[in-house]
Amino acid sequence: KAGVTQTPRYLIKTRGQQVTLSCSPISGHRSVSWYQQTPGQGLQFLFEYFSETQRNKGNFPGRFSGRQFSNSRSEMNVSTLELGDSALYLCASSFGAGRVYTFGSGTRLTVV
Amino acid sequence: DQQVKQNSPSLSVQEGRISILNCDYTNSMFDYFLWYKKYPAEGPTFLISISSIKDKNEDGRFTVFLNKSAKHLSLHIVPSQPGDSAVYFCAAIATGGGNKLTFGTGTQLKVEL
């Protein structure tokens, strides 16, 4: 059974650019969440989606957005990138309303 | 406002001995708790969870204890193995607030031979 797949694994962008990260959940999982990990702030919640609806949103500026498609795949977008957006972005999925999330390996974003 | 705290940034234990990782929380709405293990450049891996209606849950070498009155949980690993060396995060969920995981800051466990 394939795990949570995140693409790309690594990304280097320039300040001011925008970026889109992709996440394919485990087959059958309908809930997808995104987290940001930085050395200073630890693991911070970004958003949670279930059946294409955003159920929850963390305390991040509006430059961070996401969406979920009918096949449960999800994308997150960051516009007008700042140096502080450099982080490991993690996607996680769970089955139904389950509370145990399986994480992907993440996308390492570096903003220069 | 750090609602989930892991006050020990690191812990060193000898192989075969018990590892005890601690976690404290402040939000009384948290009713489900999880422990994840993380290696560098990888996503967290789920280890074990506990609902607030229980005070203990075991799975093989891993046991989680919950003390609701103290708002404290701990993860016991017995016996500790070198492969257990990783960063351990506790996380909490408040039912009714979606399935948002609030993570602690992590404890780096090193199991020495």
Image: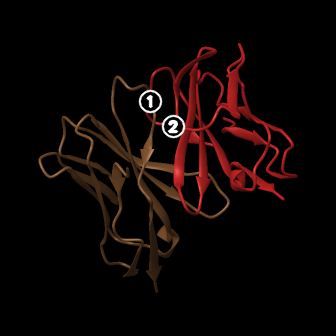
List x then y, in percent, for residue B3: 34, 48
Instruction: Determine contact: label 2, label 1, CB under 8 Å.
Output: yes
Q: Is residue B113 above or below residue A26?
A: below
- Which residue was labeled with disc 1? B99
Which quadrant would residue B14 be assigned to in this image?
A: bottom left
**How many marks do you count on the picture?**
2
- Residue drawn at 57 percent across, 31 percent down: A47
- Residue drawn at 22 percent across, 38 percent down: B28
- Residue drawn at 51 percent across, 37 percent down: A101
Colour scheme shown:
by chain
Q: Is residue A83 above or below residue B54?
A: below
Q: Which mark is residue A50?
A: none
Q: Nearer the viewer, residue B97 or B20?
A: B97
Q: Mark 1: which secondary structure?
A: loop
List x then y, in percent, for residue A94: 53, 30
Give the chain coloured brown. B
Q: Nearer the viewer, residue B50 or A23?
A: A23
List x then y, in percent, for residue B35: 40, 51
| Drawn side of residue A12 relative to residue A42, left or right | right
Q: Going by the picture, which residue comes out furthest to the bottom?
A: B113
**Label 2 is placed on what type of residue?**
Tyr
Q: Is residue A81 above or below residue B81?
A: above
Are tags 2 and 1 found on a single chain?
Answer: no
The mark lying in front, picked from 2 and 1, is: 1
List x then y, in percent, for residue B103: 44, 49
Which quadrant would residue A103 be assigned to in this image?
A: top right
Q: Which mark is residue A101?
A: 2
- Residue drawn at 49 percent across, 65 percent down: B87
| Colour applied to chain A | red
**Label 1 is placed on what type of residue?**
Asn
Q: Chain of mark 2?
A: A
